[in-house]
Amino acid sequence: MDLFSANGYDETTVEDIARAAGISLRSFFRYFTSKGDLMAYSLLLYGNQLAAAIDACAPDASVRAVFRESISRIAQQGLVNEVRTRKHLDVLSRSQSAAAAEMSRLSEVQALVAQAYERRLPAGPERELAARAIAGVTLHLTGVAVRWCLEHRECDLPATMDRALGGLEVLFCRGRQAR
């Protein structure tokens, strides 16, 4: 990420990455097929962390509580590593190819997170669809909340999450009752 941030994603070569890491090209290609695969790896790690956070919630917790707790836990990690997270977001904003590379694994990551939610939902015909929907919202809301906190220098992520969820609740739940 340091190389991508300093030199630009498109300008950084696999050779540059291997040299900076102190490994051979052969070693690099043993783990990654390209620098795009390396960029996408961070999203996969994030998905695994998020699925683990969902699984770590109390077994009797409501889906809403699991949603909030897991998002807060993972997003807080992003704020703890604020310098790295800022670099990462900067690279993504400056390079369409970096963003595309990272998003190349989004469906895989969403499936991981959906499986974690599905393990918590009651059996029924809508279980899989509901799990996928919650997974998509979780992934995107976490990104929105972390970006918001970094852009607004607001470090109270749980409060930011509560505000975002409260706003969504007004739109989707109370808004219907008002009509």
Image: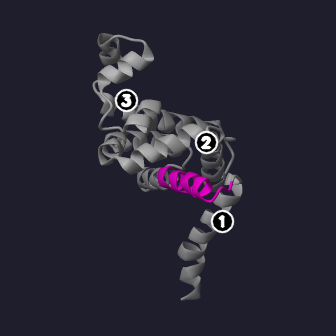
Q: Position of residue 122 (x, y in %)?
A: 54, 50
Q: Nearer the viewer, residue 112 or 35?
A: 35
Residue annotated with mark 1? 163
Please report whichever mark, 3 or 2, sits nearer to the chain's N-terminal start. 3
Q: Amino acid at mark 3?
A: Leu
Please report whichever mark, 1 or 2, sits nearer to the chain's N-terminal start. 2
Residue annotated with mark 3? 38
How many marks on residues? 3
Q: Secondary structure at mark 3?
A: helix
Q: Are marks 1 and 3 in contact (CB under 8 Å)?
A: no
Query: In which quadrant will I find the N terminus?
Result: top left
The CA span between labels 3 and 2 is: 20 Å
For residue 41, side relative to residue 96 (left or right): right
Residue 55 belongs to the span the image colors magenta? no
Tell me which corner region of the image, top left, top right, bottom left or bottom right, holds residue 24.
top left
Colour logic: one colour
Residue drawn at x 30%, y 27% as measured from the top left: 13
Q: Amino acid at mark 1?
A: Arg
Q: Residue furthest front?
A: 7
Vertical order, 2 against 89 (above or below): above
Tell me which corner region of the image, top left, top right, bottom left or bottom right, holds residue 173.
bottom right
Part of the protein shown in magenta: 139-154
Q: Nearer the viewer, residue 54 or 139?
A: 139
Q: Secondary structure at mark 1?
A: helix
Q: Amino acid at mark 2?
A: Glu
Residue annotated with mark 2? 82
